[in-house]
Image (tube, grey):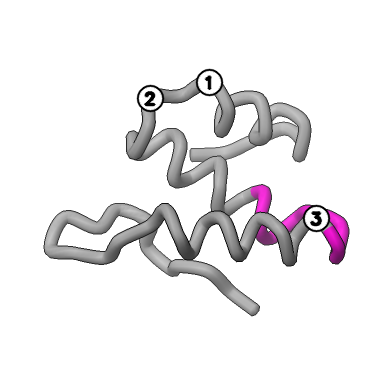
Amino acid sequence: MEFESFEQALTICMTAEEGSPEQVASMLYCLENAPPDLREMLQARFAGFHKHGSNCCCDGHVKK
């Protein structure tokens, strides 16, 4: 999924169905493109939310 801006990805992240591929893609985009202080907070929240399994759809996971 491609995003035009951080703001667009953040909006999708907040409004997409919980755990949907769209939400995961937008979270990953936000993690990679957020300002450093916000990135740290998002990484902590994403780590608590995301559970890898056989149906994992994030394709790349969190990059530090």
Q: Residue at x 65, y 79 (%)?
A: 64
The label shown at residue 17 is 2
In this rendering, would 62 be left or right of 17?
A: right
Is 5 above or below relative to 16?
below
Marked residue nearer the N-terminal end (3 or 1):
1
Marked residue nearer the N-terminal end (3 or 2):
2
Amino acid at pointer 2: Glu
Marks 3 and 1, how far apart at CA: 19 Å
Q: Which residue is mark 1?
A: 15
Marks 1 and 2, how far apart at CA: 7 Å
Is 35 above or below relative to 25?
below
Is 19 in the magenta?
Answer: no
Residue count near mark 3 (Cα–Cα under 10 Å), binned few <14, some 14–19, many ≥20: few
Q: Position of residue 48 (x, y in %)?
A: 45, 60
Q: Which residue is mark 3?
A: 38
Amino acid at pointer 3: Leu
Amino acid at pointer 1: Thr
Q: Residue at x 87, y 57 (%)?
A: 35
